[in-house]
Image (cartoon, helix red, strand yellow):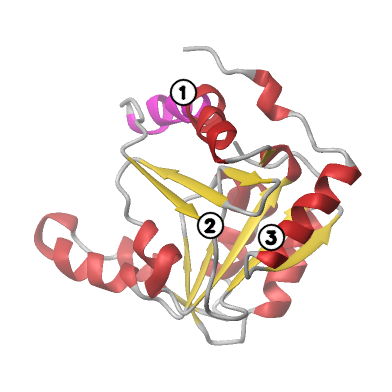
Amino acid sequence: MESNNEFGNLSANDRLERTVAALQQSGFTVETVETGSEAKEKVLSILPEKAEVFTMASQTLEQVGLSDAINTSGKYDSVRNKLNAMDRNTEGREMARLGAAPDWVVSSVHAVTEDGHLLIASNTGSQLSAEAYSGGKVIFVAGTQKIVKDNAEGLRRIYEYVLPLEDVRAQKAYGMHSNVSKILIINKEIVPERIIVILVKEKLGF
C-alpha cells in the first residue's frame, strides 16, 4: 500500500487564509503559527496548570514534544499516565470512562477542509467521544499539509495518505496492521471556544 504524496504538501498562504476564515465561521477558535516549537508553546500557554489533560495518540504531538511535556512534567493531571497504569483486561470499562470526558483534550486531525470542517480517523475510536462532545475543551494541532478542499477530499487523504503511513508505523510498533474503523467529521462546533485549532506552517505528523 503506497502513500499518495500529493496530500503531503504544505498549503499556500492564500489557501490557509481561506481555511482559517471558514473554520472561524464553523465555530472554532483558530491560531496560526510558523513552527512546531511555537505550537507547543502556544498549547502550554493555554492549558491551566494542574488541569486534567488527555493527550491522544498522535504523531504530531510526539513530533513537537507535547506528549512528553504534558505527561512527564508533573504540571498537569495526566489522563494518559493514569490509563497507562491500568489493566485493559480487568479495568477496560473504567479506562473507557476515564478517557471519555477529560477536562482538556490535546490531539490532532487527519484533514482540515477549506470550507471549515475537521476529519479524524481512528482504528479503535477511543478518542472520538471526547473530541466530538464530552471533552471539556479540545486543542487540535495540525500541519497545513492536512488542508484539503472538502470532506470528500479529506476522506481521500485519510485512505490514500494517512492509512498507508500509519499502517507501516503500526506494524513496526505493534506488529499489526492499522485500519480506518471509525471516522469523525466535525462540521461545526456549537459551544463557543470549546475547540481550538492551531495550524502550523510546518509538515507535522500524517
The residue at the far top in this view is 1
Q: State the image quarter where residue 66 is shown.
A: bottom right
Q: Where is residue 83 in the image (x, y as percent from the top left)?
A: 31, 65
Q: SS of the residue at dot 1?
A: helix
Cα separation, mark 2 vs mark 1, equals 30 Å
Mark 1 or 3, which is nearer the eye?
Answer: 3
Q: Tell me, for residue 144, which label it has, or none.
A: none
Sequence-wise, which precedes: disc 2 or disc 3?
A: 3
Q: State the image quarter where residue 173 is shown.
A: top left
For residue 198, above or below residue 46: above
- Of 127 and 60, nearer the camera is 127
Provide the residue designation for mark 2: 187
The residue at the far left in this view is 90
Residue 168 among those drawn in magenta: yes
Q: Position of residue 166 (x, y in %)?
A: 48, 30
Q: SS of the residue at dot 3?
A: helix
The three-letter code of the residue at mark 2 reads Asn
The three-letter code of the residue at mark 3 reads Leu
Cα separation, mark 1 vs mark 3, equals 31 Å
Which is the main secondary structure of the residues drawn in magenta? helix
Sequence-wise, which precedes: disc 2 or disc 1?
A: 1
Residue at x 47%, y 28% (from the top left corner)? 163
Provide the residue designation for mark 3: 23
Highlighted magenta segment, given as a residue range = 163-174
Q: Position of residue 147 (x, y in %)?
A: 70, 41
Provide the residue designation for mark 1: 168
Residue at x 72%, y 63% (from the top left corner)? 40
